[in-house]
Amino acid sequence: MVSCVASWNTTTADWELRSLNKLRYRGAWWLPEKDTKRVPGTLLFSHEEGGTLSLDGSLGEMTTVMGEPVMLQPKIILGISSKGELLTLYDCFENHRTGGSSGLVTSRFYVSRFFKGAHFTSPELVRFRSLSVHYTGLDEWVNTSGFEILYPKEEEDVIVKYKRPAPIEIPVDENWTVVLNFSCTYPSRTRVQTEAVIRQKAYVTIRTAGERTLDEYLDFVYDIRDFLTLAAMDTVYPLDIHALTEINKEKMNEGWYYPPVEMYFRQLEVPSSSSGFYDFFMLFTFYDIYDQIRSVIARWFETRESLRPVRDLYFGTLYNPEAYLQQKFLSLAQALESYHRTRVKALESPEDEHRKRKARILDKADQQDRSWLEEKLRWSNEVTFRTRMKDLLHDLSDVVPEIIGDPDKLANQVVDTRNYLTHYDPKLKDQAASVHELMEITERLKTVLHACLTAELGLGKSMVRFLFAKNWRYQQMAARFKRRQSGTR
């Protein structure tokens, strides 16, 4: 005996990891301004490689400049698949064409992204009223289930009940709202029922009044990705993206129905599965911050502009694992310097006093040297990088003490290595870290920045310390560092 109790939304889709598969659409294709000239062809698309549109013909006439062919670079190509699916290819350029006036012409376009479910005839019309994203690791981070599975006394009986979890709305500001939502698919009925499958997926919906551009939405998509990466201690990627737009709305009864538009674009490094996300690997899960989720998300978006350089440098090292070690180290060192400058307005002397000092120096300088000297003194009241590093590491020494160790020693290692890698002065080589030491210092700086950005969520130092102390990854890193310090393996 198996019973299923469920409520469901007919507008939700099955959020399988379609983005990880190669998609193929055979159909007819044309330029928006040349609706009558439709050319048969095939679109192949994958997240790893982007898209290729191969046409049995050409979308435009061949032109030349100084004898060289001029390839087309249409912002938009429209298409309709053999199954009747509306397709909009975006940011395209022609990279191959064969044949001529007397033979069969074929052409090929690279496609950076495409939309399925609507025709956008111009870039200005690519606007949405909401956008929903399923990320790698999101289900594990949320860890919210609508399932109840019961095993009565009779060994052959199983009762499965499902109720979709309620959405959680999080206002970001007066214009934008982020909704943590859940989609689900339910069992189909067959003549001989041999299985009954219910699938639930968590996703994030970004919503606003009216319609906004794709770029405005993508800013939110990547900011949320970075937040989840910070929380999960692992790189997170957007997988399935669905949006609602006024372009394809349909009249239904007394209101309007908005068929979802699917979005696909090239992404490198997307993992083949998201099975590696476990709560003990993550710095914090949804339930760790459940009581503060609205203030935490609001704080993340409040600080995104002031901390943009810091975030870009930090997350850039995470999403580019193939970057050179020296490049990662320099990016992290620069991010910490930028963070200290943003959050701690440290000056060597009061601004008024320094201004008078500069005036005295410039007054005594020769007129021909004054412009040069003024430029040299432009940042003369800034504290040194060494001072910034020591200040920052001392402040965080009670948050991630096992990783920082001696704050002054780590600060000196970072500064000396940064100076050598920046200037490559042979006199600094002996003070710089070796390759082996640089690997360890880079990992330690990454943890320090992780702590800085987590503290920016408004959780408080004691909470941040607790989150790191209980984290398995942090514990393993701290144990390795302790062994190296003691001279053991």
Image (tube, helix red, strand yellow):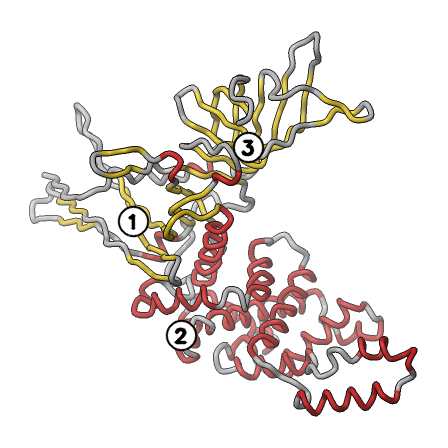
Q: Residues within 10 Å of mark 1 (few under 14, many from 20)?
A: many
Q: CA distance from mark 2 to mark 3?
A: 45 Å
Which element is circle 3 on? strand
Q: CA distance from mark 1 to mark 3?
A: 33 Å
Amino acid found under the numbered disc labelled 3: Ile
* Labels in figure, total: 3
Taking the image as shown, residue 363 lies to the left or right of residue 246, namely right
Tell which tag, 1 or 3, sits nearer the viewer.
3
Provide the residue designation for mark 1.
182
Amino acid found under the numbered disc labelled 1: Phe
Whether 322 is drawn above or below 265: the answer is below
Which element is circle 1 on? strand
Whether 265 is drawn above or below 35: the answer is below
> Can residue 427 be seen at all in this image of the molecule?
yes
Whether 479 is drawn above or below 28: the answer is below
Q: Depth check: 413 or 461 in front?
A: 461
Residue 81 percent location from the top left of the image: 44, 22
Q: Depth check: 123 or 441 in front?
A: 123
> Can residue 407 be seen at all in this image of the molecule?
no
Q: Residue at x 9, y 39 (%)?
A: 1
Tell which tag, 2 or 3, sits nearer the viewer.
3
Which element is circle 2 on? loop
Mark drawn on residue 459: 2
Amino acid found under the numbered disc labelled 2: Leu
Residue 224 percent location from the top left of the image: 44, 57
Q: Depth check: 270 or 133 in front?
A: 133
